[in-house]
Amino acid sequence: MNPALAGIATIVVGGAVVAVSARDPRAIVLAMLVVMLGAPLIVVPTPGPLPILARVAAALLGARLLVIGLRGDLLAGGTAIGWPAETFVAAAAAVAGFASHGLGAAALGPAEAQAAGFALAAVAAAPLITGRDVLRLGIGSMLLVQAALLVRQALDAPPGDGEQLVIALLTIGLGGAVAVIAGAARATGALAIPDDGDGGPAAGRLRHADAHRPTQRELAREAASAPR
Amino acid sequence: MTVLPFLIVGAASGTLSLLVRSRRGWSTGIALLGLTWMAIVAAGIGSTATIDIGGARLAGSDWLRLFAILGSVVGLLLVVVDMAAVHEPDAPGVIVLGLASAVLALAAADPGVAVIATTAGGLAGVLVAAPLGAASRAAFVGSRELRALAVAGTLAILATAWLARPLDNLVAAPVFGVAYLAFTVAVAIRFGAIPFHLWAARVADAAPGVALPLLMAWGPAAFAAVALVWIDQSVAPLLVPLTTERAVLASIGALSVLLGLVAALIQDDLEHVVGYTIVADAGFVVLGLAVLDPAIWEPIRTWLLLFVVARSALAAWVVAVHGGFGTRRLTELAGWARRAPALAAALVVIGAAAVGWPGLVAWDARASIASMALPEPLATITLVAPLAGIVIYGRILLVGLARAGTAVRGGRSERPGWPVPRPSRPMVGLSPVERAFERAGHLGSSLVDIIWTVPAATRSNRTALASVVVLVLAGLAGTVAGGGLGVPAAARAVPIAQPGPHASPSAATSPEGPGGSGAAAPASVEP
């Protein structure tokens, strides 16, 4: 085991646990930043300065976009089982990932990356499956993709500079997508999913209301038909 | 020319268009300019031109060039229809960025890079599925879309990484089947194939109609093309039968074809009709991925191009109808064909291109895919199932021929008109010289009158303009469905790709390919 890689992997997994456990959006963004900054470093050999710079810039930009989308005093749902349980889940998955390094064949990357990847996937599962607010769902999606990238680092040869650039674009895209969704949810005053069978006014309806923004023409028609 | 200029233009214009999104006119103008430029640049992509960027090779091919040209032209026409009909924000920029990322994925010789690129491109769609200021449910729709993209991307990244290394000492052979199933199921998720269709159905409800082709057809089509290359590089050369996995995949494909058509038939919302017909068409793509024979290469790549263009034309038709009559619900559109005969003609052409008949390239591609993927009589049932499209289009046309309802009577017709009467200028000159000067002056004044009125005339003839563009798109769909624009030749063309770690030496050098069926070995040939 490489102690440096193990240390970085531990920090990354810790960030993931905080990201799925915290309720304060600022803590969640900071934890995700730790994950996005640390994940590309769990690789042998360490990438050159340019790819690292691209990944760091992408992580910062992704986090910045998240911050923009999460302005205000809204709170995320947080974990239902508490952070100690999330930590144990992550630790168990990390051990499984470390022990199964290579998944049946000789791997070209470090075992620590696979351990971190398994841990991230394990903590991402609950928000993805049972997430009750858009931020938790988004964070779960981000963690799942980061988990896949970590397992890829463990199984295959280290990503080249070009691939690092494309991964950087993906990181920015993920941050932007979660920010856009959170921004749309924020307009309703909460991050909770509004009508996913939660007993809300639209719950249980076979056909949901049209989610389109009204066109100029429709707005004019509504204005004309409104009682004076 | 390499694919790089296309990518630079797409990335620059798409990003700029979204950055100035608060000024809708500027945003759309930049996207239109970008798409025009992309179409021009795409025509110059060389089929053997390659470029290495940081160790990642980007290679052109005839199919990639045709995909890029058709994508740019169709995107351009979609944006024009959108401008004329409803003018949704963000959609033009998202179309440009999505197209650029799809072409990047297709150009990447390494499937590992390609899946990351196409996943990143799909994220742009979230911007239009969950736009700022939309109804609250849009955030929920966006979350579901993001989750589907993340799951599909994760499965594909894992599958490519799993089989990308030498597996000489592999202790568990089922790994191949799991990896193959993971990637192909990821394709099914991206297309919204049944039973993974719930997120796609919600996106069809929430996203602007003009962006639907990109979200549900063009982006996933690039993903499927990457899967095809990966299967040919990494799975087919292993000569493992993978019977169970292929049966599962064929079931998903056949179910999507049959149930997608049933769902489209019972839908009342026209955008849902577009969404479910895309799901049904995508079923043939999923069916094609269940075939490990390299002979599937040509029909599946032909079908990918045909169906994305045909469904883009249908989406444009829906946008034009929505813009003209202010509703997408079929029950409120009685008499639409009487008020918009050009749109009715376009729907007939789109229906003919989408359904097809024996002998048409579209039909033959579907027949090849069905016969290779399914046993009889399932193959025949799946092949003739798209004939149900006649009922789908016929139902819409019948509603259009009925007596006009309130929405249609209050909507805009296609009849061209001029916003203001042209002023009359009587001749008062007596001598021929005076009258000649007067005529010249009147001619200049009339020209200025016309130029000043062009913006208002464009606005008042928006439905007619949209109908003409939809007719052009329908014609393009018909041409492509008939094998025009070199579609079959492009589908046969061999792309440049890095050989997979499991490609046998004979596969890398022999034109017979890994399956040895006489077809070209698509992904195993070095430049």
Image: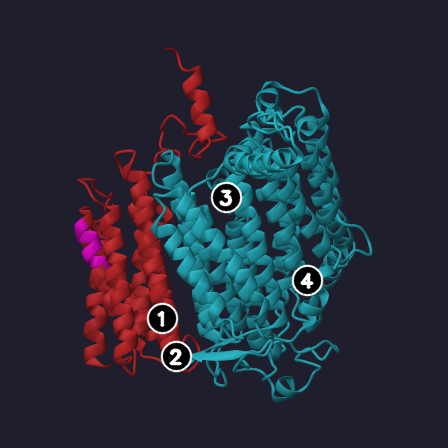
* Badge 3 vs badge 4, beta-carbon distance below 8 Å: no
Residue B191's disc number: none
The residue depicted at 56 percent of the width and 66 percent of the height is B42
Q: Which residue is mark 4?
A: B302
Q: Closest to the observer: A102 or B320?
A: B320
Name the subunit of mark 2: B
The residue where tag 3 is placed is B198
Range of magenta residues: A26-32
Q: Amino acid at mark 3?
A: Leu
Which residue lies under the disc numbered 2?
A: B54
Q: Which residue is denoted by mark 1 in the rendering?
A: A165
- The kind of residue tagged 2 is Gly
Which chain does cyan denote in the image? B
Q: Are marks 2 and 1 on the same chain?
A: no
The crowd level at tag 4 (other Cα within 10 Å; few <14, some 14-19, many 20+) is many
Separation of residues labelled 2 and 1 (CA atoms): 9 Å
Could you tell me the amino acid type at mark 4? Answer: Thr
What secondary structure is the magenta-colored segment mainly? helix
Residue B158: x and y in percent read 43, 68
Q: Identify the chain drawn in red.
A: A
Of circles 3 and 2, which is in front? 2
Indicate the chain on which mark 3 is placed: B
Near-viewer residue (A83 or A63): A63
Which residue of the protein is positioned furthest toward the front in this rendering?
B431
